[in-house]
Image (cartoon, helix red, strand yellow):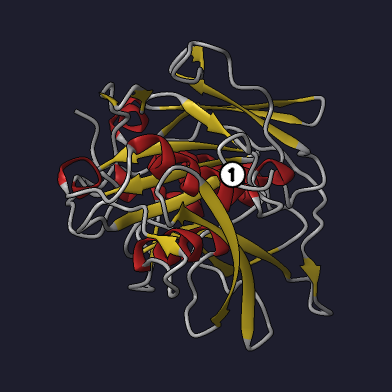
């Protein structure tokens, strides 16, 4: 069983092992008059659910080995965690043609999908600040890293991670969302616009799920989420949104069929520019359960065929 990346889970601390060597590079960090260059090192937050950038004072000689060392360690900030605290080590590092090849230890496999996404994002967003590195190719030991379908994961750039959960989503006082709930007859979905006060640091994606859990506010709509469902974590990588929900999503009393529930989530998230597809996890794991004819292990895309008026 894959480990869940949440604050209550205890992980052993393994420091990143960096191959000996030196690679001198120029950087695109922020220069200061005293020769210091400021980099952002992207740690995970204390709940292992979002990225936390921490400033690091480097110089013109700072290279990927130095940044990875910083990324791996236990930090002095109680709200920031190095990837080593997840049991993830870097056992090989190389760069060619602007692409850094980073080989991860087996500890990476013990993480859930959301945790794996955050680790990759932390490495990519930290390393691509260097002028010499435009992308990162990941390996697991000596083999290319693959997704759950066995396809090799391509070179990832900072643009591969279009949203970071936990960061402030807007400077405005409120946010506007399009949500999909069931119609009064519970046969189709209907869209509704909802304004949400910006009183949280949660990502847009997480706010959408929490609003669906909260349910509709008018009698013309019906709720879609099973009772007791909670959000464990939300992350987005390359347009794919990973939603990790509690087990109540499967066991709680549901007001509608699973088809409407799933596509209320997918269609609502697809209204955001950051999301094209959705993977639903249960307590950190992909479930092979088929409920009401819906295979919950699949990656879902927007479905407007069950939306009234579409």
In the displayed structure, does residue 70 sit left or right of residue 64? left
Image spot of residue 269 (x, y percent): 57, 51
Image spot of residue 240 (x, y percent): 58, 38
**Taking the image as drawn, is residue 76 in sight?**
yes
Image spot of residue 2 (x, y percent): 24, 31
SS for callout 1: loop
Out of 159 and 126, give the one closest to the viewer.
159
**Taking the image as drawn, is residue 16 in sight?**
no
Instruction: State the residue at coordinates (82%, 57%).
Output: 28
Instruction: State the residue at coordinates (60%, 35%).
Output: 303
Number of numbered discs = 1
Q: Which residue corresponds to mark 1? A: 307
* Above or below for 215 versus 262: below
- Quarter where residue 258 is shown: top left
In the displayed structure, does residue 254 sit left or right of residue 43? left
Instruction: State the residue at coordinates (76%, 39%).
Output: 133
């Amino acid at each position: 069983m894959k480990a869940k990346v949440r604050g209550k889970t205890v992980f052993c601390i393994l420091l990143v092992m960096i191959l000996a060597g030196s690679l001198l590079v120029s950087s695109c960090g922020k220069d200061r008059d005293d020769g210091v260059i400021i980099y952002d090192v992207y740690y995970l937050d204390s709940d292992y659910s979002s990225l936390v950038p921490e400033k690091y004072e480097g110089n013109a000689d700072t290279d990927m080995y130095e940044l990875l060392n910083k990324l791996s360690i236990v930090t002095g900030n109680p709200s920031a965690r190095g990837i080593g605290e997840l049991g993830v080590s870097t056992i090989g590092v190389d760069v060619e043609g602007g692409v850094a090849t980073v080989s991860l230890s087996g500890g990476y496999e013990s993480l859930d999908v959301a945790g794996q996404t955050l680790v990759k994002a932390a490495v990519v967003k930290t390393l691509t600040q260097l002028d010499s590195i435009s992308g990162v190719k990941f390996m697991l030991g000596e083999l290319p890293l693959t997704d759950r379908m066995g396809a090799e994961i391509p070179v990832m750039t900072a643009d591969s991670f279009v949203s970071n959960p936990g960061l402030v989503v807007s400077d405005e006082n409120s946010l506007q969302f399009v949500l999909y709930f069931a119609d009064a007859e519970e046969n189709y979905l209907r869209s509704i616009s909802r304004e949400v006060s910006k009183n949280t640091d949660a990502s847009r994606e997480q706010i959408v799920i929490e609003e669906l859990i909260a349910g509709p506010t008018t009698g013309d709509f019906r709720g879609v989420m099973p009772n007791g469902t909670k959000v464990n974590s939300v992350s987005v990588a390359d347009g794919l949104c990973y939603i990790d929900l509690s087990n109540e999503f499967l066991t709680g009393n549901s007001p509608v069929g699973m088809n409407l529930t799933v596509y209320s989530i997918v269609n609502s998230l697809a209204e955001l520019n950051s999301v094209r597809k959705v993977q639903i996890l249960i307590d950190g794991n992909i479930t092979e359960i088929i409920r009401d004819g819906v295979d919950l292990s699949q990656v879902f895309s927007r479905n407007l065929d069950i939306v009234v008026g579409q």
